[in-house]
Amino acid sequence: MSGLVGIGVGPGDPELVTLKAARLIGELPVLAHIGADGRASRARRIVADLIPPGIVELTADMPMRCAPQAAHPVYDNLADRIAAEIGKGRAVGFLCEGDPLLYGSFVAILDRLGSHVPVTVVPGITSVAAAAARTRHVLSSRDEVVTILPATAGTDRLEAALAAADSVALLKVGRHLPRIRALLEKAGLAAQAQVVTELGSPSESIQPLAKLEDERLPYFALILARRPRVSR
Ligand SMILES: C[S@@+](CC[C@H](N)C(=O)[O-])C[C@H]1O[C@@H](n2cnc3c(N)ncnc32)[C@H](O)[C@@H]1O
């Protein structure tokens, strides 16, 4: 293995780390990960027991409540340090919560280094798949259209996507909860919606959206909703 290796580590339960991810975490000489607001990354915490002592770790700290442009220098700096390690002949594993290519911070590193170094991606179990499994929520069946949406998108785009979907997973809900709740209600998707928070961690919770009184959700929370069908 050489170059940059994006490693998905699943959404929280260490037993949902693939055998391939576990093997590479134990073998690669350098691991990179991005924490937030001074805390180690969730990805690193998920696989902490698999990281051998004494390996090189490249870390970066992302301020969470900042303008999107403020993230650019953090990614630039980490990408430079990863490239320097790869230049010395060391493969670098980039730990990513869930799957690296689904809204993963790995994408920002891939954008910067993908055309300069060899890249391998190890898929991870997404928060969407794990939340569906945990709640026994059918994501889609037969000809149903299932859509994954970031709650941070504009209202018009969300409204159009929700109108066209039979089933949705909404990520990054956070402070957008009141707007998302109203859009799900308007689209006829709110009745059975489930809110899944901190999946795979000791503070995990699963609640029907209809019973939730909060005005915002933690960062690690998502909503699953499926349109009721008269006959299936
Ligand atoms: C930047 S995206 C990363 C998605 C991740 N790469 C994946 O494959 O699931 C972060 C969003 O994913 C969702 N998410 C990720 N992990 C989660 C978890 N353990 N519990 C609930 N939601 C989670 C939340 O909506 C969160 O805001």
Image: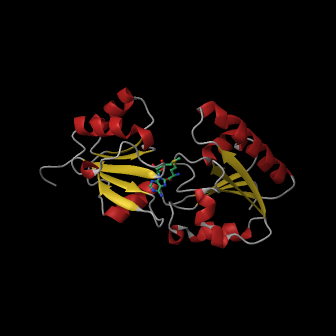
Q: Which residue is drawn at 73% across and 69% down?
A: 27
Q: Quadrant of residue 23?
A: bottom right
Residue 103 in the image: above or below residue 187: below
Q: Residue at x 40, y 38 (%)?
A: 176
Percent position of residue 70, x then y: 65, 33
Percent position of residue 221, x then y: 43, 51
**Residue 48 visible here:** yes
Residue at the far left in the pictured view:
230
**On-image quarter of the C terminus:** bottom left
- The residue lying toward the viewer, choosing from 14 and 93, is 14
Apparent side of residue 157 relative to residue 38 in the rendered image (left or right): left
Apparent side of residue 205 relative to residue 84 in the rendered image (left or right): left
Residue 120 in the image: above or below residue 72: below
Percent position of residue 29, x then y: 78, 64
Q: Which residue is drawn at 73% across and 50% down?
A: 118
Report how many numbered discs are placed on residues in the image.
0
Apparent side of residue 22 relative to residue 10 in the rendered image (left or right): right
